[in-house]
Image (spheres, rainbow, N blue to C red):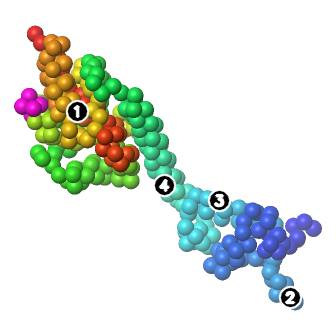
Amino acid sequence: MLLNQRFTIGEMAKMHNIPESTLRYYDEKGIFHPAIVDSQTNYRYYTIGQFSMLDTIKFLRQLNIPLKEIKRYIDERTPSFALNLLEKQEEMLLKKQREIEYTLAKIKHKIRLMKEAVQTNTHTVFFTEIPKRKITSLPITPNVTDDMFEYYIHSLQKNMKQVDNSLFSGDIGVTVAKDALLQHDFQAYNSVFILLDYMPFQIATSNVIEEGIYACAYHHGPYEETDKTYIRLLLAIEQDGYEICGDAIELALIDLSVTSNQEEQVTEIQIPVIKKR
């Protein structure tokens, strides 16, 4: 008796937690029709035997499979068709999971950097050992314009297939050539890079920032005005018996993406050093 029970569109919608308009749309598009049409009243009814198919449609929609593909599956369904459909969707979901993991890692990384930045002392120079860091990088031309700099960053992110995450800097840095440092040309950037170590997945790269001892300081204010901070670093390096052994690194901890006030910008400057012999 129960198997012969009929359900109106309103009853079917309520039982399956789906809008009546959706069932009407499925009917209109030939995806899911009422199984019974009353010959006397022309009223249309669903049956219990259709519950499984509606559940399948709902499941496929939750996987964001287009209705066109769902209709094709219903019309032509076979085990091999179902397997192919699910494998394709699994691949898309894994890609989405990767993107979510990447975004969460960037957010956590940015939170740590910003907390660190707001607590820094402007006038302190400190020496610390930093482990090897994986990066993806591009060389840049001297006196690069802001527009070209954005293009370089976009190119790096595109190579990583993460072009939609440019809001959060923190992981983006530049280097200043050692020779330029010694000549006090502190704006002579020679490369731009993205740090990869905090990424939740591996990215093939042969580029690294080598481990070593770094003289570090935090510059507060526009990055165009880092000269005083660099001079303070160079004095501390000399006074503590060190010498520069590589290119300087600048990491944007707080930049114009998170503040409209240039005086609130914070840049960490790291210069690799070794003890003088």
Q: Which mark is residue 258?
A: none
**Quick one: quadrant of the C terminus?**
top left
Q: Is residue 5 magenta?
A: no
Q: Position of residue 2 (x, y in %)?
A: 90, 66
Residue occupied by mark 3: 59
Q: Are marks 3 and 1 in contact (CB under 8 Å)?
A: no
Dot 2 lies on which element? loop
Q: Position of residue 89 (x, y in %)?
A: 52, 57
What residue type is disc 4 on? Met
- Earlier in the chain: of badge 2 and badge 1, it is 2
- Earlier in the chain: of badge 3 and badge 4, it is 3
Q: Is residue 89 above or below residue 34?
A: above
Dot 3 lies on which element? helix
Q: Which mark is residue 41?
A: 2
What residue type is disc 2 on? Thr
- Earlier in the chain: of badge 2 and badge 4, it is 2
Q: Is residue 183 magenta?
A: yes
Q: Which mark is residue 249?
A: 1
- Earlier in the chain: of badge 1 and badge 4, it is 4
Residue for point 93% across, 68% down: 1
Distance Cα–Cα, label 3 vs label 4: 15 Å
First to last magenta residue range: 180-184
What residue type is disc 3 on? Phe
